[in-house]
Amino acid sequence: MENLLWIFISALLVNNFVLTYFLGLCPFLGVSNSLETSFRLGLATTFVMLVTAICAWILNTYVLVHAPYLRLICFIVVIASTVQFIEMLIKKLSPALFRAMGIFLPLITTNCAILGLAIFATNRGYGFWEGIIYALGAGVGFTLAMVLLAGLREESELSSIPKLIQGTAMNLIIAGILSMAFMGFAGLFSST
Amino acid sequence: MKKNESYEEFIKGVWRDNPVFAQVLGMCPMLAVTNSAINAVAMGMATFFVLVGSSFLVSSFRNWIPKQVRISCFIIIIATFVTIADYTLLALVPKVHKELGAFIPLIVANCLILGRQEAFASRYPTRLAVMDAIGMAVGFLIALLSLGAVREILGDGALFGVKLFSVNFEPWVIMILPPGGFLTLGVILLFFNWFKFKKDEFLDDVAEAERRGS
């Protein structure tokens, strides 16, 4: 139990996917201009990460023990098609849910955060529950980072910023400062 | 003429449409592995191999790949090359492979590579596609190297592992940690913006002068 909690906190704060591993930067910088959108994108990403963790566990346990060199191709193909399938299912079953996060699903399927999650979980030899908790932590951490950046960007719209700095350069510098703040969490587990 | 055309595709990727500085593509591996110049070069070479190889293959097969499933075909081709690169690095330089870790398989998700297949290799003849891929890959390598060199010099006082300063130099440890990646790239992009700004201003001035002259 303690181990699972550790995995969750570690993926959420200490090794935040965006701010420490630099995974999923494209949506992080591209879609973070409004708080609402980035929150929904974060939820959709968390959902896809959970699906990914399950897929990766099944593949690792039953398929890839026989052919480890096919790992990458298998992960991509299986994750992409599963997400596509779920997208169709949601569209059919719950149009409201589809409107809330469905449009983001194809966007994030081949995102490096998703693939990175599968690869990290494999490299660390996580079991089924560990994988799920890890995915949950990573997804919530991703949402947290997105929402923080989006909030700061919305604030910055109201202030007058030199034209030169506006755009990606400023977002990167904001992200750098956020990342510095998250480094403070590295001390959380120093005693263990 | 023919030589010129290839050269044009090459130089476009290196400077004018530089994948990182001008198009802001392929950021994830870019920031993650540039904490030292050596890692940056290894990553750049791996990306070079994957990009050129898959551009060549995609462009050779461009008339046989059905339009509807082209993205999946591209991804499978790219994933194959990445797997080759992964195992090759593991065999040749196990130490670097260990440091880059999960970021080698993640080359697959680099939007730069898929972007070039979709935008260029699947539409143009092989020779041009390969030149374009080489140009883009060299541009990416230059970007990785400049970022890696800045971060290693400031964060470690060294370049390619060779100490540059005397013991009095206090390294900025933050530069080799994750925040340093964001800050360095932000500042480099700032310089590029400034450069573009100045150039636009200059071109405006020239146009203004011409209008007055005529």
Image (spheres, grey):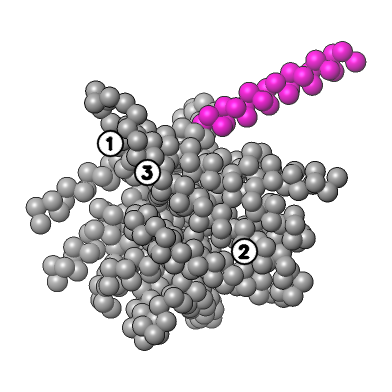
Magenta stretch holds residue B95: no
**Dot in front, 2 or 1:** 2
The quarter of the rendered structure image containing the N terminus of chain B is top right
Q: Residues within 10 Å of mark 2 (few under 14, many from 20)?
A: many
Describe the element under mark 1 as helix, strand or loop. Answer: helix
Q: Residues within 10 Å of mark 1 (few under 14, many from 20)?
A: some
Residue A190: mark: none
* Chain ID of residue with mark 3: B
Q: Which residues are magenta?
A: B190-214
What's the residue type where badge 3 is placed?
Answer: Asn
Instruction: Looking at the image, tell me whether mark 3 or mark 1 is earlier in sequence order.
Output: 3
Instruction: Looking at the image, tell me whether mark 2 or mark 1 is earlier in sequence order.
Output: 2
Residue B147, picture quadrant = top left
Image coordinates of residue B66 in percent, x first then y, are 72, 75
Q: Which residue is mark 1?
A: B173
Give whichever of A152, A52 is nearer the camera. Answer: A52
Viewer can see residue A86: no
**Measured Cα–Cα span from mark 3 to mark 2:** 27 Å
What's the residue type where badge 2 is placed?
Answer: Ser
Describe the element under mark 2 as helix, strand or loop. Answer: helix
Q: Which residue is mark 2?
A: B54
